[in-house]
Image: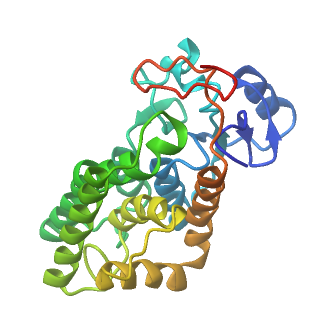
Amino acid sequence: MNTCNIWQVDSAHQYGLKAAREYNINCGPIYTMKLYAVSDGPPSLAVRMCLKALDIQYQLINVDFCAMEHRSEEYSKINPQKEIPVLDDDGFYLSESIAIMQYLCDKYAPDSTLYPQDVNVRAVINQRLCFNMGFYYAPISAHSMAPIFFDYKRTPMSLKKVQNALEVFETYLERLGTKYAAGDNITIADFALISATICLEAINFDLQQYPLVNKWYETFKVEYPQLWEIANSGMQEISAFEQNPPDLSHMEHPFHPTRKSKGLK
């Protein structure tokens, strides 16, 4: 399953939006919770790890990024930002992966160590989530993901920004002195940061020069194999696209420049 697949229902059958609803009525189990996601999108993967960790049953509806279904008018009805993922909790729509994970923990597992109620602990988790969104994942995505799908180049400057983000994360881990990003227990902050870091592994970026980040990353793989399976599925897709970038020359994206196909000049 990869980014260019059409909508996926229950990880098995592929339909359009309307057909997905019909499938839900006629063929498959009916879950009141649905997640509109893209199979190799780091924010989507973070939410999926959270749902798995909380043991919440839901219907996975995979969005076709390459066909720009997330830019459609139909999709804009559930998310005017036209971004992925979106949670539909029995008619309550929520976008932004961080907000979704916070909501899931607050509503369904308020006493979970994934997002504890303690003010100071939660503050550190929130800081790590903000750090990931604006300082860590942003340059990683620009360096790793953008050149795969669009007409961007990896440059010494884009690499420097990634290195800077990793250096700061290394410092946070050193100062806190804990196993995971916000404490000795795994939290939703780790889901966000892990899903960002897989983008580096997908392009064979060497994390060895950041020993604490590397240790944190490898520890997660060993201690949470079922959660890593979700992250790894996305990483493998990104890695495959790194080796064979998709032809998106047909796409008229409003923000990103698309590469011309080999047959065009």
Q: Position of residue 199 (x, y in %)?
A: 47, 58
Q: How is the image coloured?
A: rainbow
Q: Residue furthest top?
A: 73
Please report the residue visible at 42 percent of the width from the left and 77 percent of the height from the top. Answer: 217
Q: Residue furthest right?
A: 27
Q: Position of residue 16 (x, y in %)?
A: 74, 25
Nearer to the camera, 173 or 180:
173
Q: Quadrant for the C terminus, please.
A: top right
Please report the residue visible at 77 percent of the width from the left and 34 percent of the height from the top. Answer: 24
Q: Is residue 172 left or right of residue 202?
A: left
Q: Is residue 167 above or below residue 148?
A: below
Please report the residue visible at 31 percent of the width from the left and 48 percent of the height from the top. Answer: 138
Q: Is residue 26 above or below residue 168?
A: above
Q: Is residue 59 above or below residue 73?
A: below
Q: Quadrant of residue 132?
A: bottom left
Please report the residue visible at 55 percent of the width from the left and 35 percent of the height from the top. Answer: 90
Q: Is residue 68 left or right of residue 166?
A: right
Q: Position of residue 150 (x, y in %)?
A: 50, 34
Q: Is residue 164 above or below residue 252?
A: below
Nearer to the camera, 231 or 31:
231
Q: Number of callouts in the render? A: 0
Q: Position of residue 163 (x, y in %)?
A: 26, 65
